[in-house]
Amino acid sequence: QRIRSQSIVPCTVSQLLAAEQVDETFRIRDVEISQVTIMGIIRHAEKAPTNILYKVDDMTAAQMDVRQWVDTDEAGGENIVVPPGTYVKVAGHLRSFQNKKSLVAFKIMPLENMNEFTTHILEIVNAHMVLRKSLMSASRGPQSFSAGIGDMGGYGGGGSLPVNGLTAHQSQVLNLIKNCPIPEGMSLQELKLQLHNMNMSTIK
């Protein structure tokens, strides 16, 4: 069963290059995508009479060709070439010509600071988790989109799915150490007393 994303999906270049094409649609893990955003650094810019061709590198795969059509009737800001070395956010449509994927951009925005890059990475993780979750829900039967998002929040406790890069066991140990009121911290023996369901090698 397939699901179609109605919104702009944040992606990495490697995800776009690996996207499967069926007829005129592209899919990432059975989710149809249409409009996407990527972030990266411009490595090359070349202006032609009708378009500007950029090569954008987000360090996840080969550089992506990004083409922005210029409005020949209007000498506006959209026709300004963004110089190489600039970090940008690109919003556009994924296209494929002779088995080579590229983006046709409808917006190219230079980043104001690198926090936007970090935010973009988090948005990618979140968006693809939500899409995958709704795909699983769709295969199980009718379920509201919000219920799918609610289920996702329940992973942190007893599950083995890492949270902030830590497993549930590591998170428990970290929380005990962080909440310890004594400046010297806690000994392994004290941790073992508190975490009686864990063996010593797991705590270490």
Image (cartoon, rainbow, N blue to C red):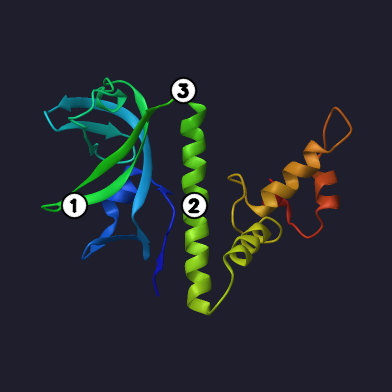
Residue type at numbered disc 2: Ala
Q: Is residue 58 visible?
A: no
Asked if disc 2 and disc 3 are in contact, CB closer than 8 Å, the reply is no
Q: How many marks?
A: 3
Position of 52 relative to 120 (above/below) = above
State the residue at coordinates (46%, 23%): 112
Rounded to the nearest angstrom, the CA distance separating label 2 from label 3 is 23 Å
Quadrant where the N terminus is found in the figure: bottom left
Position of 22 compared to 89: left or right?
left
Mark 2 lies on residue: 127
Quadrant location of residue 26? bottom left
Position of 126 compared to 14: left or right?
right
Residue type at numbered disc 3: Glu
Q: Position of residue 169 (x, y in %)?
A: 69, 53
Mark 1 lies on residue: 96
Residue farthest right in this picture: 181
Q: Which mark is residue 112?
A: 3
As rendered, which of 33 and 191 lies closer to the eye? 33
